[in-house]
Image (cartoon, rainbow, N blue to C red):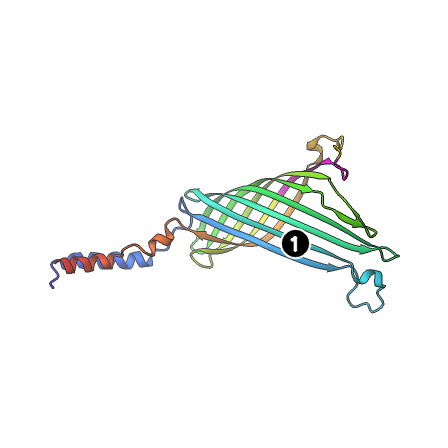
Amino acid sequence: MRLRNPILFLLILASSIASAAQAPDTLAAGGWEFGGSLKFSHVPGYPIFDDEVPDQYKDEYEQFTDISLSVGRFMAEGFSLALRPSALFHSRRYFNSSLQESKRHVLFLGLGLEPSWYLRLSPSWMLGLGGEAGFGIWPGLPGIDDDVKESNKSFEFQLWLEPKVRIYFLASELLAPYAEIGYRLAVQRRTRDSNGDPYDPGVPLLEEVRGRFLFSLGLKYFLPQGARLAETRKSPYNDFMDIIIDG
């Protein structure tokens, strides 16, 4: 077996080294990005170090469960469009002086559309500029009022618009924790009361717009286009071996 072209060997070897050293382009068109969060908190309704808490308070609590996901695709270099479904569940349990139980539940289901523009600041840092427009609902949930079960057929909806700025730290080629600040403009409107009857607040929609400033920390995973295929395609080294074997 004889090598016919040493120059070709050197070119293929250099190409192989460069290919191995090249990092995937996380911002290229056709790639994907994933993120999400899960928060749960349990808040007892009494001082936890108080030995003289009345019995009516010992089983009181509030619970919050907040879930959100983010799935986005890069439509162009450095520009992604993501969907952000989210859910919030709040439950409160308390008792009156006769130890009669009351329970209240609140559920929110939302869906946001989030465009983002990415700017590389350095090999380890990226800036994200974008926003989110969304729609959500608050369906009424049945509860308990002084040991008596009660229905709740109320319905509310919410609209929001939120500009956002994020700073990403590239912990690896595909994983980036980030810090985010945003300012949400939102309006919430009840359309049905607890009996299911139409409800008119008598106020124009725009007069109920409220603002909210938010700072949060998150984590995002990037999946460049063809990342899985790149692991299985034939390498320049295999091409070189084919040349040697074929003579």
Q: Is residue 246 above or below residue 73?
A: below
Q: Which residue is mark 1?
A: 65
Q: Is residue 84 above or below residue 97?
A: above
Instruction: Please tell me which residue lies in front, 148 or 180.
Output: 148
Q: Is residue 70 left or right of residue 16?
A: right
Q: Residue at x 83, y 69 (%)?
A: 51
**Quadrant where the image shows the N terminus:** bottom left
Q: What predominant SS class does the magenta segment belong to?
A: strand
Query: Given the image, on which type of amino acid does mark 1 rest?
Result: Thr
| Residue 191 on the magenta span | yes
Dot 1: within a 10 Å radius of its alpha carbon, few (fewer than 14), some, or many (20 or more) residues?
some
In the rendered image, residue 240, in percent from the top left (x then y), is placed at: 20, 58
Q: Is residue 170 above or below residue 212?
A: below
Furthest toward the right, the residue is 98
Q: Is residue 201 above or below residue 102?
A: above
**Quadrant where the image shows the C terminus:** bottom left
Q: Residue at x 78, y 68 (%)?
A: 49
In the rendered image, residue 127, in percent from the top left (x then y), is placed at: 49, 49
Residues in magenta, as a range: 184-196
| Residue 190 on the magenta span | yes
Q: Is residue 15 left or right of residue 59?
A: left
